Image (cartoon, coloured by chain):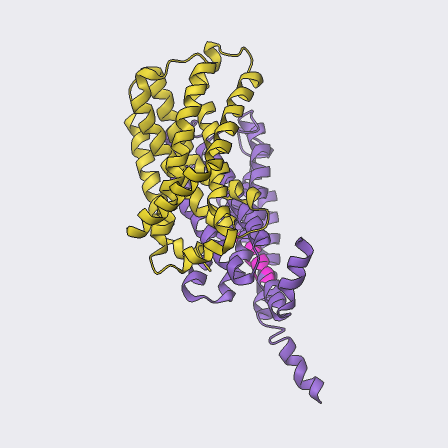
Chain colours: A purple, B yellow
Amino acid sequence: MTDAIAKPEQHPTPSAGGGARRVSAAALAVSFALWAYLVYAAPLDSVQGLIQKILYVHVPCWFAAYAGFALTAVCGGLYLWKNDERYDRVAVAGAEVGVVFCTLGLVTGPIWAKGTWGHWWAWDPRLTMTLVLWFIYLAYLLLRSFTEGSTRTARFASVYGIAGLAAVPLNYFAIELFGGAAMHPDNLERGSLGEGMGWPFAAGAITALLAMLHLVLLRVDLERRRAAEGPSTPDWASAEGD
Amino acid sequence: MNALLAVLWKDLLTELRSRDRAIAMLLFSMLMVVIFHFSLPGGATAATRAYAPGLLWVAYVFAALLGLGRSFAIELENGAIEVLARAPVDRGWVLLGKTLANMLILGVVQALTALVFALFFEMNLLPVALPLAGVVALGSLGLCAVGTFFAAVAVRTRLREVMLPLLALPFYIPVLVAATRATNTLLETGSVSFASIHFLLVTDGSYLIASFILSDFVLDE
């Protein structure tokens, strides 16, 4: 009898957000299938040929990475303001998922660049800026694992997550003012997308953002379960580290 | 404001009495200059001298990181950091006081390093000494503002000596880009490039304001 009452208390809301996760998984599956078909059916680029199709992976990865980092910064600010640890769980999820997509973008970029520009790497402002962001959010994750005490971890991480995104304009202008020539197109309005490339590109962007959302929801749920495990979490975390 | 002066005076007095931090930083940056000589082809050739601004700033950055890490590590002894955080003053002033103390200590190290650098690489820095000191001061204000702020964070983590460079270096890029450009123009033409100086002023200002506003979140009991 007591067990039956105690159990729900140990795991307060085991299915919280389960519905949202199922919806995001279904939407992701549909969007992924549509994207795969549209990329397959998209016309070949008249100059670059097949390699141009990496666009439908490369650029959506950046949308997802920036969305993840923005989520970290915004939720970091909300955590410092409201002092509610739920915001911190979303912040860490955003940073982790953002780093994954940023890594994918940094890997697919040079593959495309080697095929079209002839170089693996160029010190182009946007390229350098995203590399700096990658370093910043990896440092964010390291800072989390090296700080002791859960409220201090959340507080330090929030500050660093905000500072990381706030440093974007400074870094960007520094690199643009004094750095190398820009090789990326300025924006989409300049018509860098050819005819028939808009839909697969849009599908790619939606798929990447849905994938980011789904991974963030899974990651937040993991953090929530860890927190629900109770105060034992900091103990094993620090015992493992030392 | 009084808190700023009090912290500044306390840090400078501690350093004057022990001198261990400045000596360690100076030896380290001198060793780096020697290592530059052996790791670059041709020793003190014109080609090597073209890299001088970059090399000088690399030495400055590593010396700064070495000193900044100690800046809060010494406060851990006897729990002084908790007293600092509990003082009934705005923590922003405490952080700014420490920033200025770090900058002054780093300034002494930078001046002596530049002297050694000029000797080893046969460069005459005397004609541009004054504007060079100005550029270096502007650059190190940015380095120390962001570095002192993250030193307060890193000191509370495990592996703090590793954490500080990882946290601070991405934020050093804008300062370094502008400072090396300004130094380069100065050494090449003898005059200052105002685009770099403006950029340094903007960067320093934003780092100082940000560290003042966010000081409550990094200096805690």
Q: Pinpoint residue A13: horizontal percent, then vertical percent.
A: 60, 75
Q: Quadrant of residue B41?
A: top right
Q: Nearer the viewer, residue B206 or B138?
A: B138
Judged by its main secondary structure, the magenta piece is helix
Is any part of residue A122 visible from this angle? no
Q: Magenta part of the protein: which range?
A: A209-219
Q: Pinpoint residue A80: horizontal percent, then vertical percent.
A: 43, 61
Q: Nearer the viewer, residue A61 or B176?
A: B176
Q: Nearer the viewer, residue B16 or B108?
A: B16
The residue that appears at 53% across and 55% down in the rendered structure is A94
Is any part of residue A116 visible from this angle? yes
Q: Is residue B173 above or below residue A235?
A: above
Q: Is residue A83 above or below residue A191?
A: below
The residue that appears at 53% across and 25% down in the rendered structure is B32
Q: Pinpoint residue A31: horizontal percent, then vertical percent.
A: 57, 55
The residue that appears at 38% across and 25% down in the rendered structure is B181
Q: Pinpoint residue A177: horizontal percent, then vertical percent.
A: 36, 30
